[in-house]
Amino acid sequence: MDEGYAGEAVEQLAKFENFYEHLLELQQTIPAELDKLRCQNKTKTYRFRELMAQKHMNENTLKLLSLYGLD
């Protein structure tokens, strides 16, 4: 019988892993959205600025995680 792992710590780790994977996915999709807006000359729009801020925030979060060996 395979018991596996269970408990709050395992659930928290799973949530962290999902969060980390989501950040990595966003860092792949955001540049394409920014390029699309650049091609449409929409670099001064709210959406462009929001995406740029999100990209920088994600980069900083990923750097902090890496600094603590959580990547």
Image (cartoon, rainbow, N blue to C red):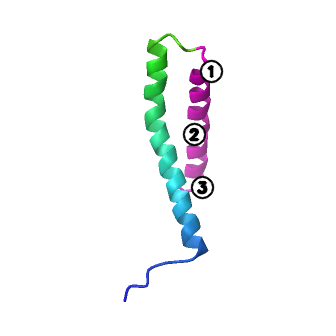
Q: How many marks?
A: 3
Element on which disc 2 rests: helix
Q: What stretch is highlighted in magenta?
A: 44-71
Residue at image location 43% in from the left, 85% down from the top = 3
Element on which disc 3 rests: loop
Amino acid type, residue under disc 1 in the picture = Tyr
Q: Is residue 42 magenta?
A: no
Q: Does the magenta stretch include residue 59?
A: yes
Element on which disc 1 rests: helix
Q: In the image, residue 50 lies at what x, y percent?
A: 61, 27
Q: Residues within 10 Å of mark 2 (few under 14, many from 20)?
A: some
Q: Mark 1 points at which residue?
A: 46
Q: Mark 2 points at which residue?
A: 58
Q: Which of marks 3 and 1 is nearer the N terminus?
A: 1
Amino acid type, residue under disc 3 in the picture = Tyr
Q: In the image, residue 21 lies at what x, y percent?
A: 47, 50
Q: Which of marks 2 and 3 is nearer the N terminus?
A: 2
